[in-house]
Amino acid sequence: MNSTGLYGLLLLLLFNNGASQVIIKTLPGYSGNLPFKLETGYIGVGENEEVQLFYYFIQSESNPDMDPLLLWLSGGPGCSALVAIFYDFGPCAFDVENFDGSLPSFILNPYSWTKVANIIFIDAPVGTGFSYAKTSQGYSSSDNKSAKDIFTFLRKWLLNHPMFLKNRLYIGGESYGGKLVPMIAMEILRGDRERLHPQMSFQGYIIGNGLTDSNIDFNARIPYAHRMALISDEYFDSAKINCDGKYYNHDPNNLECTNALQRIQECLSHINQLQILDPKCGNKAPKPDDFGWDQTFSNDNSIDRLDLPSTDQECHVSKLRLTLSLKKELYKTIFGRKEA
């Protein structure tokens, strides 16, 4: 592993320790002061605040007093908020073109949502990114518990940032956020009915590429591929007849269905399933992602970890281990990780 590149990345992550907040004005890899306001911190939730949820808050570059406030969840569950910040719609991105294996640098994103919105990027549920629990029991979680924890987090965050109470509030997420985001919205509406403090100016929620119901979502892939002319009428009709329209979690004893699905999978294996209009070899990863039909979207190596050096003071972080739900080959490229 290239320790210099890894250490450079970690220095980019200047985090908060405890309940207070830290304002980050500069970052290694970027020349000069940041042109946006970045705050990081932990907020404790649970009866004894045993769960410590980590966040990155980036103020709107336009009119933070009037622009909406968005709480954003990455997918997974368990995908670090850094993915949304650096690879979705955050204010900066890694300069991959000029990366030479040393200290990673980054460039500004002219299309960042933070141009017009205040955004809280949260590492949730517990165990994601730098969010952690003080007890082993604190790591026990579920969708219901996670939604309640995030609602509690949001209430406490707004009490610590009362200047944003009047801003229009939205909840957003991608992938697995399709399940969590509506549940968080329900918690907010429940809190509003019960007049919990503080009252929020909740307007709605946003879901991108959302997972809602596994059977419905994944069962729809083959009909969608057929309508998009990615598979032939012959292949589709064979699967439809032999699988009786049930392509997800089909009966493994039904060999005709299994064979029909294998033919379709072989056909789709040559297509970039994340963006069918792009060539499969068009990304910068040394090995393109091969997403199968598994509902986790990744295979055995989906969870990788960064073991951090002792940089408490530099990074302001309590938990010296970063978890990202990414496949290994993609992870190595994104974060400059190479084998020795």
Image: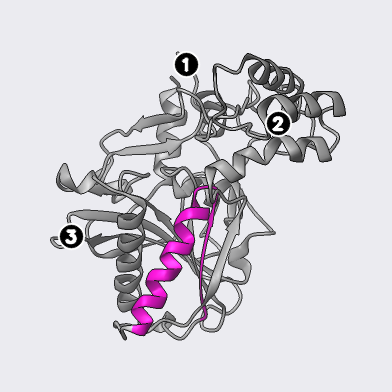
Residue 78 x/y as whole percent: 41, 43
Which amino acid is tagged 2?
Asn
Of the 4 image quadrants, the one containing the N terminus is: top left
Foreground disc of the pair 2, 1: 2
Which amino acid is tagged 3?
Glu
SS at mark 1? Answer: loop
Give the class, few, some or many, for how many residues have Cα within 10 Å of label 3's Cα (few <14, many ≥20): few
Q: Is the magenta stretch mostly helix, strand or loop?
A: helix
SS at mark 3? Answer: loop
The span shown in magenta is 168-193
Q: Are marks 3 and 1 in contact (CB under 8 Å)?
A: no
Q: Is residue 131 left or right of residue 284?
A: left
Residue sitting nearer the eye, 167 or 176: 176
User: Which residue occupies 16% across, 42% down?
Assistant: 136
Q: Distance between the residues labelled 2 and 3?
A: 42 Å
Q: Are marks 2 and 3 in contact (CB under 8 Å)?
A: no
Residue 286 x/y as whole percent: 64, 21
Give the class, few, some or many, for how many residues have Cα within 10 Å of label 2's Cα (few <14, many ≥20): few
Which amino acid is tagged 1?
Glu
Q: Distance between the residues labelled 3 and 1?
A: 39 Å
| Mark toward the start of the polypeptide (2 vs 1) | 2
Q: Is residue 30 visible?
A: no
Q: Can residue 197 be seen in this view?
A: yes
In the figure, 277 relative to 213: above or below? Answer: above
Label drawn at residue 339: 1
Give the class, few, some or many, for how many residues have Cα within 10 Å of label 1's Cα (few <14, many ≥20): few
Residue 110 lies within the magenta run: no
User: Which residue occupies 60% across, 18% down?
Assistant: 254
Label drawn at residue 49: 3
Label drawn at residue 24: none
Report which residue position mark 2 lands on: 283
